Image: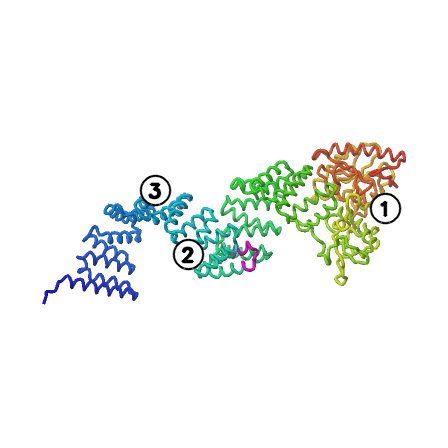
Amino acid sequence: MAPVDPRDDARLLLQSAAEAALALIEGGDLEGAVAHLAGQAGIAAAQPVACYGFGLLCVKAGDLPSALSWFDRAIGLDPDDMRTLRARAVVLQDLGRLEEALASLEHMARLQPRDAGLRCDIGIVLRNIGRAQEALAAFSESQRLAADPCEALVQSGLLLAVLGRSDEAIAALAEAATLRPDEDVLTPQGIRLHNAGRDHEAVAVFAAAGGRRPLDVEAELKRGQSSVRLARYEDAIACYERAAHQSSDDARPLFLKAAALKMLDRLPEALAAYDAGLVKDPLSCEAHCNRGNLLHQRGATDAALAAYARALAIDAGFLPAHLNRANIHYRAGRFNEALVHCREILRREPDHAPASNLLGAILHEQGRDDEALGALDRAIAVQPDLPEAWLNRGNVLRAMDDLDAAILAYGEALQRNPQGADALSNLGVARLELAQVDEALACFDRALTLQPDFPNARANRAGVLLLKGRLGEGFAEYESRWERTKPVSRLVTPPAPQWDGEDLAGRRILVYDEQGLGDLIQFSRYLPLLVDCGADVDFLCRPSMRRLLGGLLTGVHLVEAPDPRIPYDFASALLSLPRGSRTELGSIPSSRSYLHPDPQRAGFWAAQLGAQGFRIGVCWRGNTVTSPKRSFPPACLAPIAAIPGVRLISLVKDERPDELGAVRDPWRIESAGPTFDRGPHAFVDSAAIISRLDLVVTSDTSIAHLAGALGVPVFVALRQAADWRWLLARSDSPWYPTMRLFRQTQRDAWEPVFVEIAQAVVTLMAGTVAGETLGAGDAPSTRA
């Protein structure tokens, strides 16, 4: 019998130990496996192959320090064994001991200087240490040595991307893809193309990579995002659905799908996707916030506010939720609530430009324009290319009457956003304030080219068309007043279709009051015309005006509310009647007078005023809140007061003593007294006094309309940028035969206007004394 070789016994023991350790590993007893191997250390320590094998088993068991110990023993027995050196370098990397791993790899490279794979591994470790340029050099050397440099090209491309050298990264990955067009190469290439904004190429590369092995969720999400940027929303949704199917616990595909569905205006589906995603990730502030945006878009503002509140409950410092809540409150006119959120954002992040911008807009709405300008200037200092801040700055400057600066600000907004219809519309308003009518119209036209459904621009354009005498077009466009940002309020929801010129014989129509008292006086002239057409007319108007209008409205039923039992055929707002009547400049229904004073009040005021002097009613202001720029200082009346025989009688309700004394002795303005128009019926005293005057001189206010409707001579002092109803460059008004218009030729220059009015008064007085027949604007005296 041959003698037994002790080495064979050792090999059998080591093999048996390895098999037992492997069985323990597969059974889940990792510590037992490592301990079992340690028990054979005495036998294995003398055999490098055994040490290497035991090290691999320790790696498999997850005990890297023990694995490293076995590899070190193996290398001690065989220092140049490449398998062990490579395995040891991998374990050192996994243990985070990168410098030692690098030393091990460099030792191997000295042993095998033409091994391209080693150079690539050295580059990876150098990259992970942060020695990027040396890593790139190693990858380059690997490419030079390798028959297939694909892996080195991929690693080089990934590092170049991290370094921000996007074009070089993409070029390296593209070269790798020509060598090995598999998912391991195409996927990083697609991601880098996506990150570089080269979405067409990214989508094509992702498509080429797809289906080669189980789906890469990250790549599919990037593919979807590139598809979104290409406005291929259906493709994006398909990507997100595949990603969601592959990664059932990941909420991101559902959130991204919701955003894509929103872009397709499939809002219920988008909301469902957000809800499904929030089941998986209920603590996503961003998702709660985006869900709130979606609810806001659907008009569910309370639910949107609740969604933002949920985001803030998770993270009180989540600034987008604060900003969105501030925006909702701002648009709802709850400015104090909006301020709270803006201030909180700026407390946390003082250089938050959107919050400073919104703060400026809020302060402007509160009339705090100096503070608003400061906030907007801070926003612009932080983010000069924020067009909304320039737009709001223009709005504030326009309100402060600095129109030239406002126009410059709107120009800055448009330079940053040439498609900004809002900035164009507001620029048009500023130009209109400067009486640049054609330039304003061009702004509104361009705004509507960019955004045809923009009601602000359409309403502004309507004003210019009416101003230019294009009444048919203007009144048609004027219907947009109901949809603008600050719409005209309706007294009632129309209970029937709007009247648009249909035959009214035997039909019932509800007409409802709107806007200012001057508008009511001017357009009430249309009501008798409806009766003349055979209509049964119900007129819903403010009770305070019914007594004044009573004589005009014969045949018109004055109502406080529509009777739900009455089936109306048509309804119309008062200022929509010119559109329905197809009014043009040559067909304005005008008569010398269509309103009449109450006889008793007229007699009372005739006695109060007396017959002496040439009596001129004066009104220098109306509603200083809604139309402050139409007023003029009462001292402007001095040239008229200086005319011998003239008396100035105030038609201003609630005039102040300093106003009455502005025209100094001996030409003081006479007050109508504390009871003037104090009752529940508006203008009853005004109409009675005006009917006994020789002339009315007034700013553009309701008194001008009242005097014109009464057929009394009336001179109206107009600012350079006059309201649309006074047309352009006319001294007469087709709406009122007894009216004359006196216009500023320079902005805010009232003195020449009143010099001209004083001259016209002298002429009027001379004609009255001579008993001449007076023309338009110079009606015979109604003196008692």
Crowding around mark 1 (Cα neighbors within 10 Å: few <14, some 14 to 19, many 20+) is many
Q: Compared with residue 376, is residue 32 higher up or lower down, i.e. above or below?
A: below
Q: Which residue is mark 1?
A: 602
Left or right, residue 704 beside residue 351: right
Tell me if residue 269 is in the magenta stretch. yes
Q: Whole-percent x and y of residue 148?
A: 33, 49
Q: Compared with residue 535, is residue 409 higher up or lower down, i.e. above or below?
A: above
Of label 1 and label 3, which has the lower sequence position? 3
Q: Quadrant of the N terminus?
A: bottom left
Between circles 1 and 3, the one closer to the viewer is: 3
The residue type indicated by label 3 comes to: Gln
Q: Which mark is residue 39?
A: none
Q: Whole-percent x and y of residue 154?
A: 37, 48
Q: Which mark is residue 216?
A: 2
Left or right, residue 13 beside residue 571: left
Q: Quadrant of the C terminus?
A: top right
Q: Secondary structure at mark 1?
A: helix
Q: Secondary structure at mark 3?
A: helix
The residue type indicated by label 2 comes to: Asp
Of label 3 and label 2, which has the lower sequence position? 3
Q: Secondary structure at mark 2?
A: loop
Of label 1 and label 2, which has the lower sequence position? 2
Q: Which residue is mark 3?
A: 133
Tell me if residue 769 is in the magenta stretch. no
Q: Which residues are magenta?
A: 258-270
Between circles 1 and 2, the one closer to the viewer is: 2
Residue at the image point whose x is 22% and y is 62% from the top: 37
Whether residue 656 is visible to the viewer of this picture, yes or no, is no
Residue at the image point whose x is 79% and y is 55% from the top: 503
